[in-house]
Amino acid sequence: MGLILPFLIVTPLERGVSLGAIGAIFAVHSAVAIVLEVPSGALADAVGRRRVMLAGAALTVASLVLFAFAQGVPVFMASVALLAAGRALISGSLEAWYVDSLRLIDPLAPLARGLSRGTAAEGVAMALGAIAGGVLVAAADPGGADAILSVYSVAALAGALAALAYLVAVALLVHDSAAPRNGSDLEATIGARMREILATARTEAVASVTVRVVLVTAVAFGVAITAVELLWQPQLVELIGEGDEQGLALGALSAASMLAVAIGAAASPWLNRRLGLRAGYLATLVFGGVCLALLGVPESALAFAAVYLLAYLGFGLTEPMHVELLNDAVGSRARATLISAESLATQSGSLVSNLGVGTFAAAQGVGATWAIAGGLTVLTGALIARPLLRSND
């Protein structure tokens, strides 16, 4: 995904799609993810993480190939729908597989270090991919305005190859329990297990204050991060102006933001030890929200980049704590389901944001949009502070 990340918005823009229509395109992404998140997590809990992850990787490959050749809103919608389906299948499965595997090795092993290292590694990989994507785009020669491939298509195709490599890695490296095999009763068996797992997940969510707090925060985060992702590329392009350096600048800043996430994730355990998990989580959440609210202030590309990177540093600090809070509060039986429920909450916020951000930004300005999104994040931190600090689950 790092290869195409800097160009997710400007690719349809370059194809003549309006910013409002782009919001609708990515609303489809959020809607598909919302429909599939919890069922995909329950499916992973029922039949095994590996099989679900393989299916998700295959859908990701297909989505990026389609994105590379997309012409017009319907095809872009189809490509992001496939991307959302793949993401939904992978999201809860991978994290649940890691946590359960670690617990098998050492039931008392702390999660903070491994989860923060995972987030940091993901940030570095996304950064390297964004740099590579920027270089590929800068060197691309698609053959003119009427060519089937756009100048950004090469990054999408490279991303498809990377997703294919991920599929192979999952096939070789991930092992877990096999799906139940009862002949003609297989479908009924899986369905019964999924219903049982969903019931367990509902019970755990109702009983745990921490789970409910994490889910509420995930909604706010979905609104916030979508406001950033939808608007930062057009904003940076406007600040830079016309020129061949746009592709490299988009790739460089996207890479730097992922490195900021990696640095934040690497520093998160240290902050966790100093402030405590819950206080540290609140502090970093508010910090990210303040930075987001200030994104509309800079009037130069360099100043914008600085505030943008601070916001992503805050996201990187928060993410491992967010994940640790959730995993400490849930059991293994429905772990993938509840992780998917958290992702569902994020996608719900993203859907609301995608439907309104483009139109609101066109009417009121990008700065006002980011101020509201950042303010919502800070307000969420204030609202969850008391229940989170007082809960012991």
Image: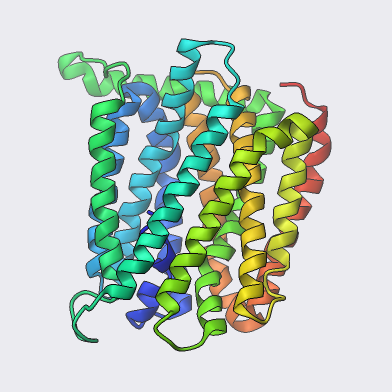
Note whether residue 2 is visible.
Answer: no
Q: Quadrant of the C terminus?
A: top right
Image coordinates of residue 33 in percent, x first then y, are 42, 48
Q: Quadrant of the N terminus?
A: bottom left
Residue located at (76% from left, 21% from top) = 392
Q: Is residue 114 left or right of residue 307?
A: left
Q: Quadrant of residue 203?
A: top right
Residue located at (81% from left, 40% from top) = 385
Q: Quadrant of residue 268?
A: top right
How many marks are shown on the rendered structure? 0
Q: Is residue 240 left or right of residue 87?
A: right
Q: Residue furthest bottom?
A: 242
Nearest the viewer among 216 and 15 is: 15
Residue located at (36% from left, 28% from top) = 44
Chosen colour scheme: rainbow
Q: Is residue 6 left or right of residue 377?
A: left
Nearest the viewer among 8 and 115 is: 115
Image coordinates of residue 293 in percent, x first then y, are 72, 65
Q: Quadrant of residue 147?
A: bottom left
Q: Is residue 375 above or below residue 261?
A: below
Image coordinates of residue 383 in percent, x first then y, are 80, 45
Note whether residue 10 is visible.
Answer: yes
Nearest the viewer among 20 and 12 is: 12
Image coordinates of residue 79 in percent, x first then y, are 30, 60
Residue located at (40% from left, 35% from top) = 39
